[in-house]
């Protein structure tokens, strides 16, 4: 099962995109609909609200929304009491609907306040539907009958674009025609959502071909933050730490467009394998140890998990806290971040060997000679500066 969070400002076109995804077979769970359902007449939710706020919030046995809104609009404590009733019921009902979806589903959760409520890590992917504000106002007034000032006030109360961009794995423009958006959704389904779902279900790491070095990408840190949050949620307290490591964690350094992460655990075992698989990072066998430095030193076991989102290549290295590579994987990028000269050398080496060696393992071996002397320099830097992993 692939879980997708779908969000965007009011009037951006979430419902329109959700409908297009449903036509491809996605199971859509609409948060607004669930929120209404859990307070319908005869529900526990409505009974709890009436008990909390009095019979004045009911009309003909149903929720009198304007009356309730008048109470909670100006009173933060009252709003918190309302949320304390409604939110757990929404979570529970949402979990039921997700659990009822077939195991090979793409479940799309339409959550208007996903960004505001920091819910991105709950999903394998977050899609943000974007339409310029003026166009949203026009559509809300023309198609949904809102008064213009009301439309603008609702837009202003929501997350801004920077916050939405940071949360978005997929930024889907709906500024053009409905047909253009439809075509973008079709491509997204075919190229990313459907294969990602199958890769997770089949625990299928996929082949990524030859390494290619690209210029440093300013969006790597924010992309890494999204994956870090998901990994941390997946492993919970079982990990000592989860870090963004590797070349993409060194600002300014050209690198392969693969984000690397390290999960440091007390002892290396299989206890995190299922959680990581379900989060979109199945185990890749055949990379079960780090090769010692200097050459000839003993190998140290590790587990490698790979991200199987076709749109975002990522590797996760699980290492025991006493593996020398757990520390080295933090030290090396820290040294490169601090030492511009070393960064330049490393970039040259990477570009040179990437041209000559077609496969990723061969590329790794070719970097070894430079790497072996660089480690000694990194260690000297750590001693001189008092660096610790923190
Ligand atoms: P949301 O669910 O994000 O609030 P909707 O999907 O309801 O937004 O879209 C808002 C309004 O704009 C709807 O009436 C919808 O039919 C219309 N709409 C959506 N996408 C387009 C588009 N690309 N061009 C024109 N109108 C659109």
Image (tube, grey):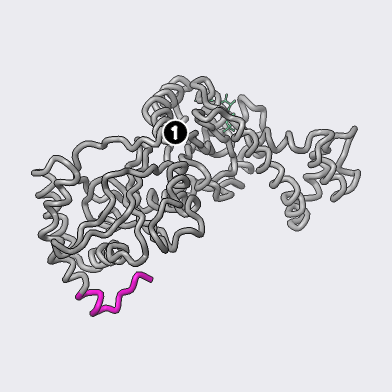
Q: Quadrant of the C terminus?
A: bottom left
Magenta region, residue range: 380-390
Q: At 42% from the left edge and 49% from the top edge, which residue is drawn?
A: 227
Pick the residue in front: 197 or 266: 266
Image coordinates of residue 238 in percent, x first then y, are 48, 58
Asked whether 96 or 142 is in front, the reply is 96
Q: Residue at x 43, y 42 (%)?
A: 277
User: Is any atom of residue 131 visible in this view?
Assistant: no
Rendered view: 132 above or below 179: below
Of the four image quadrants, the one with ligand 1 is: top right
How far across and how far down the image is residue 318, in percent? Answer: 36, 55
331 versus 93 height, above or below: below
Foreground residue among 186 and 319: 319
Residue 31 is situated, as x and y percent measured from the top left of the image, at 63, 37
Q: For label 1, count other residues whose C-alpha is less than 10 Å away and answer few (under 14), some (14-19) or many (20+).
A: some
Asked if disc 1 is less than 8 Å from ligand 1, the answer is no
Vertical comparison of 178 with 127: above or below:
above
Q: Which residue matches tag 1? A: 201
């Amino acid at each position: 099962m692939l879980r997708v969070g779908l969000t965007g400002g009011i009037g951006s076109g979430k419902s329109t995109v959700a409908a297009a995804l449903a036509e491809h077979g996605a199971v859509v769970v609409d948060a607004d609909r669930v929120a209404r359902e859990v307070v319908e007449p005869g529900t526990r939710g409505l009974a709890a609200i009436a008990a909390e706020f009095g019979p004045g919030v009911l009309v003909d046995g149903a929720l009198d929304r304007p009356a309730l809104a008048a109470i909670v609009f100006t009173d933060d404590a009252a709003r918190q009491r309302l949320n304390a009733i409604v939110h757990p019921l929404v979570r529970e009902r949402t979990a039921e609907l997700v659990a009822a979806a077939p195991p090979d589903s793409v479940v799309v959760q339409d959550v208007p306040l996903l960004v505001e409520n920091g819910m991105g890590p709950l999903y394998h992917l977050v899609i943000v539907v974007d339409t310029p504000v003026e166009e949203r106002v026009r559509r809300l007034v023309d198609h949904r009958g809102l008064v213009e000032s009301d439309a603008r006030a609702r837009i202003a109360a929501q997350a801004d674009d920077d916050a939405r961009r940071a949360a978005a794995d997929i930024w889907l423009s709906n500024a053009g025609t409905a047909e253009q958006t439809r075509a973008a959704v079709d491509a997204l389904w075919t190229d990313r959502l459907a294969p990602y779902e199958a890769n997770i279900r089949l625990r299928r790491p996929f082949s990524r071909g030859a390494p290619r070095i690209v210029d440093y990408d300013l969006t790597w840190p924010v992309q890494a933050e999204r994956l870090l949050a998901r990994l941390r949620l997946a492993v919970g307290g079982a990990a000592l730490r989860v870090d963004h490591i590797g070349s993409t964690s060194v600002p300014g350094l050209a690198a392969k467009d693969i984000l690397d992460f390290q999960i440091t655990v007390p002892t290396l075992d299989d206890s995190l394998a299922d959680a990581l698989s379900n989060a979109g990072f199945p185990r890749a066998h055949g990379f079960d140890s780090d090769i010692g430095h200097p050459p000839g030193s003993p190998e140290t076991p590790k587990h490698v998990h790979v991200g199987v989102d076709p749109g975002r290549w990522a590797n996760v290295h699980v290492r025991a806290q006493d593996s020398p590579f757990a520390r080295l994987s933090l030290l090396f990028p820290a040294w490169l971040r601090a030492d511009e000269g070393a960064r330049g050398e490393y970039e040259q080496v990477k570009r040179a060997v990437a041209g000559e060696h077609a496969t990723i393992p061969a590329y790794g071996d070719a970097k070894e000679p430079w790497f072996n002397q660089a480690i000694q320099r990194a260690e000297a830097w750590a001693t001189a500066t008092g660096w610790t992993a923190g």
